[in-house]
Amino acid sequence: MEIIRGKHTSFLNASTLAERLDGYDTVHIDIGTGDGRFVQHVAQTCPHSFVIGIDACRENLHEVSRRAPSNALFVIANAQVLPPELHGLAAHVTINFPWGSLLEGLLDNDAALLESLFTVMRPNAELEVRLNGGALSEVGWSLEEGADRVRDVLTVNGFEVRLPITLRACELRACPTTWAKRLAYGRDPRAVYLRGVSSVELLGVAAYTTQAVNLG
């Protein structure tokens, strides 16, 4: 898989990745990581976890990846086709304020995206999704309807998801992502938080994604 540090990219195979993960308690994967500041924060505050940020846009990662701590790694990949080297590693997956194809994939019940999510997760892994009102309105959804839709999509694909929680401006300010800060101080500080766990074994993915295609 392709990784980045500063402006330099290279490739990391499964055995070398396993060496880097050795000694860490858990693996946390952040999908659509943007500029990588969330990954940097989690890696610094949770030294016993190995944190992997994934994004298709390498330019945004130049600054943070250059000074990433030893327990952080940045991967260049599309969320619909996550590298096989990551399969079955994550005990915790986050998707913070998705937009573009990542948000549309969650709303449209994209089978490739949902299967890709499941393949990187261990059984009973935790999933956190934060959605903002502005991004949802750009693709024709209200905050409440969009949050309910994403929850329904995740549920039919094998996740047990709690009811959405509204995030206020003060909570957004405390969230260690660049977008959260922009939202908190912007004109439209509306956001919701979804939290769930993967509720089926990885071998059940195909059955759930087949059901998911028919979600109304």
Image (cartoon, rainbow, N blue to C red):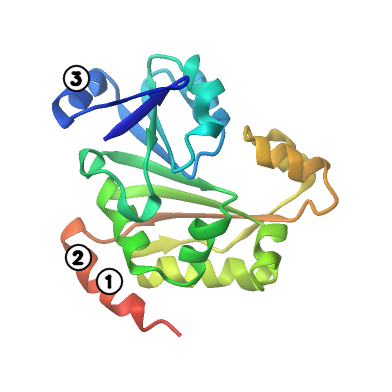
Say if mark 2 contacts mark 3, CB within 8 Å.
Answer: no
Tell which circle, 2 or 3, labels the residue nearer the N-terminal end.
3
Badge 2 element: helix
Q: In which quarter of the image is residue 144?
A: bottom right
Number of the label disc, if any, that sits on residue 204: 2
Number of the label disc, if any, that sits on residue 208: 1
Q: How crowded is mark 3: few (under 14 residues within 10 Å), some or many (20 or more)?
A: few
Q: Nearer the viewer, residue 48 or 116?
A: 116
| Alpha carbon distance from label 2 to label 3 | 29 Å
Q: Say which residue appears at 75% left-offset and 55% top-offset.
A: 190
Badge 1 element: helix
Comparing labels 2 and 3, the label whose residue is closer to the camera = 3
Tell which circle, 3 or 1, labels the residue nearer the N-terminal end.
3
> What's the amino acid at mark 2?
Gly
Above or below, 23 against 205 in this view is: above
Q: How crowded is mark 1: few (under 14 residues within 10 Å), some or many (20 or more)?
A: many
Badge 3 is on which residue?
19
Q: From the top left corner, tell me how far across and down residue 189 is, in percent.
A: 78, 51
> What's the amino acid at mark 1?
Tyr
